[in-house]
């Protein structure tokens, strides 16, 4: 059986390497716009000075160039998922994890959170972690190895003993879209693992770029 803890470790290592490459690339793009004599992009420049204008042009470049490209590539990745198929193993229906308790999800749903609303329309909590462990022991072990303790475990009662959805025609969009993120851990039995493996390097790169851009945006003070 695949060692999920090792998979998570490998993914983190890959992400660190890709993150560094993305940071260098973005730094290069920022420096290309740098006016002569300006200091650091995060310095405090008075309004109207070349440094302040540089900061503005960098933020514009992020929004109108890099972020648009990230969005385009991410949309492509999700569209490519349609080339792969669910093999009906039922694992994602038998064990769904959330950082939110049922009560928190209920409050979110009452406040208009569409995901929480759909999630609660099908999933109910396991009575105990031990029950969830019986379904997917390696996943629970991986969470424990990574000290991810604040996780709630759910399952869908609409799955029958033959791993078939008994309300297939009316299943919510979150079921139809699963998995909607190639960076999420998938069960070994999932038919979308080939998709995940193929697109993962690009998805990691896009994720790292977004994280780096967020950092720039938070620390630039035009
Ligand atoms: S509604 Fe059907 S597809 Fe969705 S989680 Fe339940 S059993 Fe699975
Ligand atoms: S884990 Fe993957 S293959 Fe299994 S039921 Fe869910 S989407 Fe289908």
Image: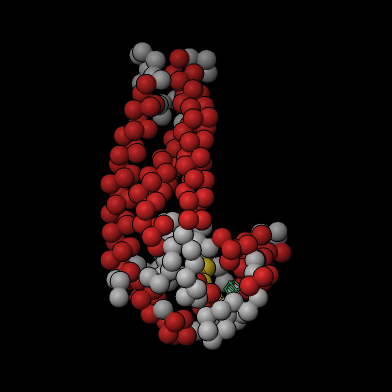
Q: Position of residue 60 (x, y in %)?
A: 52, 27
Q: Residue at x 34, y 33 (%)?
A: 25
Where residue 210 sits, quadrant-wise, is top left
Q: Can residue 112 be seen in this view?
A: yes
Q: Position of residue 86 (x, y in %)?
A: 49, 67
Q: Which is more toward the observer, 165 or 142?
A: 165
Q: Is residue 87 above or below residue 25?
A: below
Q: Where is residue 50 in the image (x, y as percent from the top left)?
A: 45, 14
Q: Which is more toward the observer, 133 or 105?
A: 133
Q: Residue at x 33, y 69 (%)?
A: 4
Q: In this view, does 158 lie to the left or right of 188?
A: right
Residue situated furthest front in the rendering: 83
Q: Position of residue 113 (x, y in %)?
A: 66, 59
Where residue 104 sits, quadrant-wise, is bottom right
Q: Residue at x 34, y 37 (%)?
A: 23
Where residue 38 sits, quadrant-wise, is top left
Q: Is residue 28 above or below residue 185?
A: above
Q: Quadrant of the N terminus?
A: bottom left
Q: Is residue 24 above or below residue 173?
A: above
Q: In this view, does 213 lie above or below 112?
A: above
Which of the four quarters of the rendered structure image does ligand 1 lie in? bottom right
Q: In this view, does 205 lie to the left or right of 161?
A: left
Total marks in image:
0
């Amino acid at each position: 059986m695949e060692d999920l803890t090792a998979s998570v470790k490998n993914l983190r290592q890959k992400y660190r390497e890709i993150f560094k490459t993305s940071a260098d690339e973005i730094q290069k793009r920022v420096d290309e716009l740098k006016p002569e004599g300006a200091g650091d992009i995060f310095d405090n420049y008075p309004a109207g000075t070349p440094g302040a204008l540089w900061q503005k042009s960098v933020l514009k470049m992020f929004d109108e160039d890099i972020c648009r490209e990230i969005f385009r590539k991410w949309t492509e990745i999700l569209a490519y998922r349609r080339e792969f198929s669910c093999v009906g193993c039922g694992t994602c229906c038998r064990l769904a994890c959330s950082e939110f308790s049922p009560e928190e999800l209920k409050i979110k749903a009452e406040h208009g959170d569409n995901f929480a609303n759909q999630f609660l329309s099908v999933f109910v909590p396991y009575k105990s972690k031990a029950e969830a462990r019986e379904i997917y022991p390696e996943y629970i072990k991986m969470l424990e190895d990574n000290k991810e303790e604040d996780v709630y475990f759910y399952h869908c009662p609409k799955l029958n003993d033959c791993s078939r959805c008994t309300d297939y025609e009316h299943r919510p969009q979150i079921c139809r879209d699963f998995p909607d993120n190639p960076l999420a851990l998938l069960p070994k039995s999932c038919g979308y693992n080939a998709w995940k493996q193929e697109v993962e390097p690009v998805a990691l790169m896009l994720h790292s770029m977004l994280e780096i851009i967020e950092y720039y945006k938070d620390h630039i003070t035009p």
